[in-house]
Amino acid sequence: MESFAQHYESMCATVQKCMPGADMALIDRAVEYARNKHKDQLRKDGSPYIIHPLAVAEIVAEMGLDLDAILGALLHDCIEDTDASFDDIAKHFGTTAAELVEGVTKLTRANFSSTEEAQMENLRKMFMAMSKDIRVVLIKIADRLHNMRTMQYQTPAKQIIKCRETMDIYAPLAHRLGMQKIKWELEDISLRYLNPDAYGEIMSYLRAHQEQDEAFMRTIQDKITERLSAVGIHNTTYGRIKHVYSIYRKMQAQNKTLAELYDLYAFRVIVDSIPNCYNVLGHIHDLFNLVPGRFKDYISTPKPNMYQSLHTTVIGTQGIPFEVQIRTWEMHETAEYGIAAHWKYKQGGMGSNEKDFEWVRRLLESQQDTDAEDYVNSLKIDMFDDEVFVFTPKGKIVSLPAGSTPIDFAYAIHSGVGNSMVGAKVMGRITNIDTPLQNGDIVEVITSKAAKGPSRDWLTICKSNQARTKIKQWFKKEKREENILHGRSSFESEMRRLLLPMSALTEPELESHLLKKLAFDNWDDMYAAIGYGGLTATKAVGRIRDDINRALKAQEAEKTPKSLLRTSADSEALRHNRHAVNGVIVEDIESCMIKFSKCCTPVPGDAIVGFITKGFGVSIHRADCPNTQHKDDPKQAARWVRVRWANQDEQPFETTLELECLTRDGLLLDVATTMTAARVRVKELYGKDLPGGKSTFTVRFEVRNVAELESVRTKLLNIRDVIGSRRGQN
Ligand code: MN
């Protein structure tokens, strides 16, 4: 059994060594606070619980972290295991320390054991994403390290679970954070429990050869130091046997027994400056025979996890190869403690502001290769903005686009689950199905056999394409009648917009030709396709529009205007062949001034009406313009006149679209690029931010007709984060 005093003194000594001038009174208060809170709890070995936080704090101090992190480590189990609250800790030790404790608590509560290899990367990402502050991850790694060191007191079943989790999550994270020393220790302890036979075999081999190994390493070490002293290079040189797990991995990878493995030895030469690293390299190559192809310069090209050293493999006097790593003291610190070492080189600590990742900047400045970028991507905590990681009730992890809702989750599980969803529970509580999910949420879908299937709103609520596709599929299959109605009505309104008569569809000569062009067997099939979203009405009409117009013209030429023409008034106007002004023909008025209203900017193809203004001729509005709603008011009725577009060469018309968007950088550029690609002339383009992360873009541009306008509109709506559009109504 271990004593409080022993751990307390050891922790204090380490803190004073690693952080001279630290506020020991504050640390004492945290120790007392934690000791008091945990006073009724015992470790598995029967010792007082406080020993664990003391040991974790000591590891955190050794890493070189700051005072807040040490306080966080001392208090790290208080919220989880005692009645201490966030507010209470914040009151006594500051908000930062309290936030670190809370962050660790969140990680403790999440379940990071998964049996699926494919899930590992997601688990690691989620682990990082859940920790708002990198110090939370480091405290959690220290916590795990101490628990691993005291693993012998756990039950065998628990040992296996914890060691797997360590190999899956903690050791790779330590590696990524550049903390070699901790990574090795985690791996060696894990191997001891996960494969005791292999571990035992390697350990007894190493023990049996200990004297021999030490003698060999002493010879080499003496040879190196002798030479370096002779040329006046101040150095610290030592040899070591590679760590157990890396030997185990080599045996596995090369399928060799221990006796056949040669490169078990590694030597380190630590010097004061980078030029001396290269000097030492020259001397090593002079003293021993070089193994070709094994030299690596990680000083000029650091590893993604910031590791720097020169590596070379040479062959010693007895024909035994060994590796030599040459580095400066600063590189050594970084190699041992990784990211944590950077606290030591930055004044005032790193702080909790993620934007202030000094080392990330340094890393990006020093290395431009893709590896480094990958590394930063995988590391920087707020870089997973575009993904959210949640759990099924059984602990399976599901990765979804950020902002995803229980709807997305349900369809990610199975389309059957989504289609029969009637509600959802998040973290055990009933939640609206459009609530955005948070990292680490446990999501449960409530299904019912009586469910009526998805609603059309879901298509706009869900964030993942997967969900959207599956919902569309459902509508396609289950709701044919409804789809036909829906599709028919949008098709009809599109036809109306382009002044195409529906009767054309059933013209004996035309019908089969049009259906063939659209690739449908009958009109209902096409309406159904439009109804479930497989085809847009704009596209469908666009495909057959020219054919209908051609047929219309042919019929006119044959002087059989009746069948295809809309109204007798229309045919009347045609026969009169009135003079068109600005492309518009005003019924009953031979010649007049025409202007296009600014409120609704009509373009050819729009259904339009005219209003006789006082002194400015006839102003043309879209039929659906709000300003036309008083048309039937008896006082004004006489001033509204029938107008229509003349079939003349199409001249450009100005129109305005207002786009509703989710705010993001680069959106304006995307809009501009799309407009350019669509080859339309943009007269004006501006955006403004709205509350709630939304923004609007207003774009004024020229089109020839409604078909062109709709095609531009479709392209704009295809831009990511553009969620809606409106014709301008100034
Ligand atoms: Mn703990």
Image (cartoon, rainbow, N blue to C red):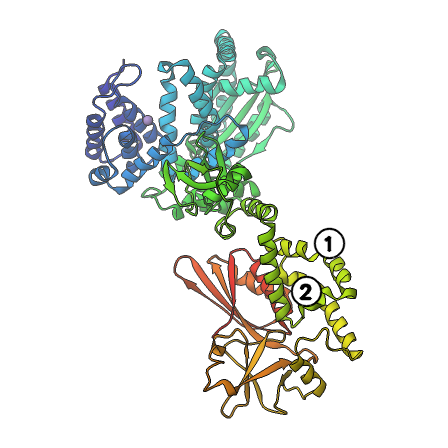
Q: Quadrant of ligand 1?
A: top left
Q: Is residue 703 left or right of residue 28?
A: right
Q: Is 611 in front, or is 167?
A: 611
Q: Quadrant of residue 575?
A: bottom right
Residue at image mark 1: 521
Q: Is 326 in front, or is 29?
A: 29
Indicate if the residue with disc 1 has its beta carbon within 8 Å of ligand 1: no
Residue 115, which numbered label? none
Query: What kind of residue is marked 1?
Result: Asp
Q: Is residue 363 visible?
A: no
Which x, y percent locates residue 450? 48, 40
Which x, y percent locates residue 1? 27, 13
Q: Reply above or below: 641 against 474.
A: below
Query: What kind of residue is marked 2?
Result: Gly
Which x, y percent locates residue 201? 51, 9
Q: Reply above or below: 56 against 360.
A: above
Q: Quadrant of residue 551?
A: bottom right
Q: Is residue 248 visible?
A: yes
Question: Dot 1: what SS?
Answer: loop
Q: In whole angstroms, how far apart are the C-alphas of marks 1 and 2?
A: 18 Å
Residue at image mark 2: 542
Question: Dot 2: what SS?
Answer: helix
